Every structure is written in C-alpha cells, then in structure tokens.
Amino acid sequence: MSEKRKRPTLQDVADRVGVTKMTVSRYLKKPEQVSSVLQEKIQGALDELGYIPNKVPDILSSSKSHAIGVLVPSLTNQVFAELIRGFESVTEPAGYQTMLAHYGYSQSAEEARIATLLGYNVDGLILSESFHTERVRRMIKTAGVPVIEVMDSISPAIEQAIGFDNEAAAFAMTELMIERGHRNTVYFAARMDARTRLKIQGYERAMRKHGLEPFSLQTEQASSFTRGALLLRQALEQHKDLDGIFCTNDDLAVGAFYECQRQGIAVPQQIGIAGFHGHDIVSAMVPRLATVVTPREEMGRLAAENLLARLQGKPVNRSVIDLPFRLEPGESLRSAS
Amino acid sequence: MSEKRKRPTLQDVADRVGVTKMTVSRYLKKPEQVSSVLQEKIQGALDELGYIPNKVPDILSSSKSHAIGVLVPSLTNQVFAELIRGFESVTEPAGYQTMLAHYGYSQSAEEARIATLLGYNVDGLILSESFHTERVRRMIKTAGVPVIEVMDSISPAIEQAIGFDNEAAAFAMTELMIERGHRNTVYFAARMDARTRLKIQGYERAMRKHGLEPFSLQTEQASSFTRGALLLRQALEQHKDLDGIFCTNDDLAVGAFYECQRQGIAVPQQIGIAGFHGHDIVSAMVPRLATVVTPREEMGRLAAENLLARLQGKPVNRSVIDLPFRLEPGESLRSAS
DNA sequence: GGCGTCTCTGTTACGCGTAACATCATACCG
DNA sequence: CGGTATGATGTTACGCGTAACAGAGACGCC
C-alpha cells in the first residue's frame, strides 16, 4: 500500500493506450486532430490514471507560465481585496492564474517578493506601489515582463500606471470640508506610505489655499477602527479647536466616529468626519460618513485588461490612466450653508 | 534597442566568468564551496547581468516547487484575509510562496482551481471547505501532496482538519441569547455553504432544546452590511414577535444594527443582536455587538505549521484539531437576569 | 499508374538548474 | 616517495510536455 506511487505522466497514459505521449498531448490540446478510436481510448486512460496536467515542463521550454504576479502591501486591507477581485474577474476567465504576494509596506520585502515571483516565470506583474528601488526597476527590465502599477496615476510610470490622483482627491475633500464650515480639520494618517504622503500634500495644499493651518496626526501602525479611536483622543488633547477630521481611509474614520459617540461629541455639529475609499460600511452606517469613493474594482479590471493586451503583443497605448474619484458627502459634514 | 534580450541564465553568468554553470549554481547555494577568487568574480558577473534565479527547471526535476496552494471561497470576506495572514506569517519566513486561488463558493470552481494549482506542482494544499467532490479527493490522492482543511473541525478529514466547531459555536451563542431573554431569535444566513448549514443546525438544536421554534432567513447573496439591513426589514415583516437576531457573520449583524437605528428600534431592549467571528468592528462600535470570537489567524498559523511539518516527512499526529471559540456578549444583548 | 494532398502518428530536440559522480591538483602523512 | 585525504571544479543525465519536422498510408484525380 505504501509504494510511493508517483503522479502519472503523459508517458504513462500513452503507454497504457499504446501510442506516444505526443498523441496524448495533441488529444489534450486539440482532440479533433486525433482519430476518434484513439480519442476514446485516450480519454479512458486519462480517467483511469487520474492524469493531472503538468504545466511545469511547458513553462520551462516556453517561458510562459500563464500566471501573473500580483503584489499588494496588505491583504487585510479591504481596498486590495477589492482590487484583486476586479483583476481576477478578467484574468481568471482568460485562463491566467494569480500568484499573490504581499510585502507589508516594506520596500525590501517588495524586492524579495518580485524576485520570487519572477523565479516562477510569471508572465506579468501588477504592483501596488508607484515608487520603487533601482534594483526593482532593473529586475523588471531584465526579466522583460510587462508591469502595471496601480493605485495612483503617477507619472512617469515604469511602463504603465492605472489609478487615480490621490493628491487631488484629498485636496477636493478638504475643500469640501472647509466649504461646509469645518475649518479646523485635522488629517489622520496611518502607515506612512507614498500614497498617504500624497494625500497629506493634497490636504495641506487645500488648507493653505484657504489660509488655514494644516495639522496632521500620523502613526506608523496599521489603520483600524481601534486606531481611529485612539487618534481621535490624541487629537482632542492636542488641538482644542478641532472641528473636523479627514482620515486617510474609512477604517480610521469609522473608529473616530465611534469614539465621538462614546464621548458624546455630536457629528457633524461639533466635529465633521470624512474617510477615504467609500467602502460599504460608511454608506451603511448611521449617519453615513463622508468619503472619497475610489475605483478599486475598476482599477483591477483595467489593469488586467491592459496587461493581457500587452501579453498579446499590443503596445502600451496610454502610459498613465487616470480614473475619476467621487466625493460622497454623506451625513457626517455640516449642511452646505 | 529592440533586440529581444532574453533573461540571463546561469550559463550566461558562467560564460562570463569562464567556469561551468555548475560552479555558479554551487556559489548561489553554498558560496563557501567555491574558491574565494571565483566567489568575487561570480558575484560580479551576477550583478552585471542582473541574474534572476529561475526555479522552474528545479521544479521540473525535483517536483518540489516550494509553493503552497491556498484555496479560499472569497477574498473580500475578512475572515479569509486573516486566515491567510496567519498562514503566511509561518510559510513566508520558511521560504514558501503562496499560490492563492478563490472559487466563489462553487464546488466545480474549486475542482478547477485545485487542478490548476497542482499543474504548477504546489507542494501542499490548504482548503477552506470540508466537503468535496469525489474528483477532488481523487486528484489530491493521485497528486500525493499533503492537504489540510481549515475552518471547521469536521471529521473525518481528507487527511487533517484544523478549525473549530461551527455547530457548537452557534449552539452556545443561541443559548446565551435565550438566557438573556431573547427567546424569539431569528437566524440570518447568507451564502448557504456547508459551514452556514452547520451553524443553522446548532442554532436549531439550541432553540428546540428550550422548546422554542427556530426560524431562519436565508439568502444566496453574499453577506454585507447592506444585506444585513435588508434581512432585518424582511424579518420584521415575517415575524412580529422578533426579539433577537443571530447572524451568520459580523457583517450582517452590523448592517442589521444600523437598520435598527434607522427604524428607531432599541438594541438590546427591543431586539438583541449577535454576530459571528469577532472582527474588529463589532468591538469598536457603540454598542459593542455580541459575537462568537473565532481563531482565524491561529487556524492559519497552525495549518502552516502542520503542513510544513508534513512536508518534512513528519506524520500527521492529530487528524482533527479543534480550536476553541469564545462568546463575547458585548452590549447588544439584554443583561443577565 | 503516378503524383499530389490530406490525415494521422511518430521522432527529435529543447528548455535550464542541480544531484550524483568523476576528475584533477594539492597537501599531508609515515 | 607512495598513498590517501581534501578541496575545487567539471561532466553527465534527468525531469516532461510540446513545437517542428518527418514519415506513412489513404484517397482522389487525370
């Protein structure tokens, strides 16, 4: 019973039928090229042995793996789950397998993950970051695989970027808050990555434009509901006149809102709250929170479509695709005056 | 410029140094086995050419890919993101790459994904389901890779299961609700998978034990905050005496709670609410919701540790590992009388 | 009957990193 | 100095699916 039975190969199937493995291989790819007598016999042998196709030899000789490497900073962040869902809605029907890796917002980890993915001969790469080390750029160039950067419409891209304008989005929301009378708005940031810095820039630009003093609270920790509550308590201590908070993502905003509830602070009368991304929760809760709705799934879909096109040899037509965002005022900002 | 420069191979590096590729291969694995003169030269050539290690030939000849296939029904469900985080916290330091695939709760899709993953010669599989088609069982047996099923401590496992007892967890929470005076509790279910059915069984067993009539609302849709609100409206129409709802996961519970807020229904005085899993949000919100806290990350970690042990040839010591869950009463149930 | 054409199957070679074994030079020993 | 141990490098073969080409038989056409 314990003979280590090896997984059957094409040769095993061929031997059983009495043909060469080439004929079996043909049957698997284009059954009509094989005589009908053999078709049946081969299918029978495949079933009996339980043959499982092995892609590895073909990857070795053709260097095409039909797998795409997707790098995200974090999986527990809903944004990236939705991005991946959009991406796979295109790649999966096209027969591409996703190799997912995450790097915890660390550039050196990103570098290592890219090397690993290229070691499996992925046909293409999706990166969720717009700033990369020289080594990363070099590896990608050497490997010669198409790459798309998502999440930000930053130029110049390595080859192609698909995203939205984080700076402009933060600027627009900040202006909306000011317009609604939240002039002493504090920015809540977590996980200081490149995108967060862009958002802070947008926030600061809007504040300064209106003659206001920007003030941001930053933490290296990951964002979470709990973190939002902590930041709110911290902000109340440091900034007595506080009348608004703009959070780098919805989690912080939701957490901050709950803390307001606990402290008996009226939202939006005393403090206005805005988040970022437009996840399901901010529109489900009472009150609905203001947020910047970003095109997560569409980014994923477009990235997949463009990558597949390039795998078919089509050239990059637009090196930067800037998708629109949308301001959702919700009920957590004061009424327009 | 457009000469299609191929990715450098070990041979290219070797040629540049004037040795055979075997020497370069040795340098990469055990540098001390190569003379110090060559060490420098080889490193220089590696850097110059930007050599990227290629795992595929080795996978072909050794059938070891150092990759593990992880199958989850859905990525946007936070539960699985946390499971994967726990899993990778062990596999990543051990040098294993995760190949993630999801199957949208469809058995035929699961079958196809498993075949694809085995096509890449993954060294092991993690499945998030405890019920499988005969073909799936056969494929796994034929491929001869170790498999671990997570999310439920169901026996018999294909080989090994690591999870918790969904039926008992639902039973326990239902009893707690009854004890707290929520005797007309309705069960909210979504995505009718095997685990949901087990939870419903636990709920029904508890209700019947106390002479109460079970009543569950089910939808094939994915669960979400919005869905929880819809189900609450539906429940109020169909069940006038309703004084409690127990949701198959936290998302539904949170959504149902917000709908109570909108309708001016007092929680927990009029309706008690309980969720399932213990995500961050239910303990951050006001009031904190009752929930069953499940060991998501630990399941992932344990699954990884056990799988790695088996890849090193250790036998399965416990075929079913039953992890504890914990009832968190929160503030959304009436006080103990 | 001879020739081209078509259909089906077989043959050969390829991709590339590494285990296992072979070889060679040097060092060390009694 | 013969013999053996040691270290460094080279040689060979392997894994397995598939592209490209080759061959064989059947058929049709003039």
Image: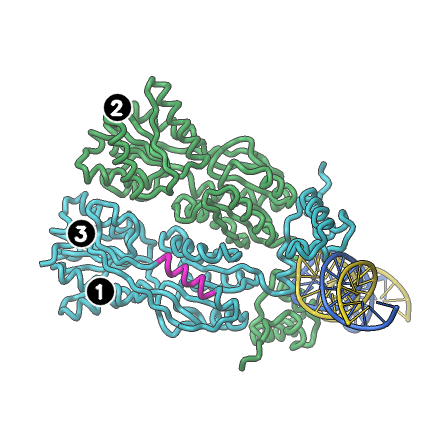
Chain colours: A green, B cyan, C yellow, D blue
Secondary structure category for the residue under label 3: loop
Chain identifier of the residue bearing label 1 in the image: B
In the displayed structure, A226 sits above or below B310; it is above
C-alpha separation, residue under disc 2 versus residue under disc 1 = 49 Å
Chain identifier of the residue bearing label 3 in the image: B
Look at mark 1 in the image and give the residue it sits on: B172
Question: Counting other residues with Cα less than 10 Å from the Cα at mark 3, is it few (<14), some (14-19), or many (20 or more)?
Answer: many
Note whether residue B32 is visible. Answer: yes
| Residue positioned 50% across, 49% down in the render | A90
Question: Residue A297 location, x and y as percent?
Answer: 43, 43
The kind of secondary structure the magenta stretch mainly shows is helix
Look at mark 3 in the image and give the residue it sits on: B332
C-alpha separation, residue under disc 3 versus residue under disc 1 = 16 Å
Q: Which mark is residue A64?
A: none
Question: Residue B218 location, x and y as percent?
Answer: 27, 59
Look at mark 2 in the image and give the residue it sits on: A181
Query: Disc 2 marks which amino acid?
Result: Gly
Q: Which residues are magenta?
A: B296-307
Query: Disc 1 marks which amino acid?
Result: Ala
Looking at the image, is mark 2 or mark 1 nearer the viewer?
A: 1
Q: Nearer the viewer, residue A130 or A215?
A: A215
Secondary structure category for the residue under label 2: loop
- Residue A284 lies in what quarter of the image? top left
| Residue positioned 33% across, 61% down in the render | B192
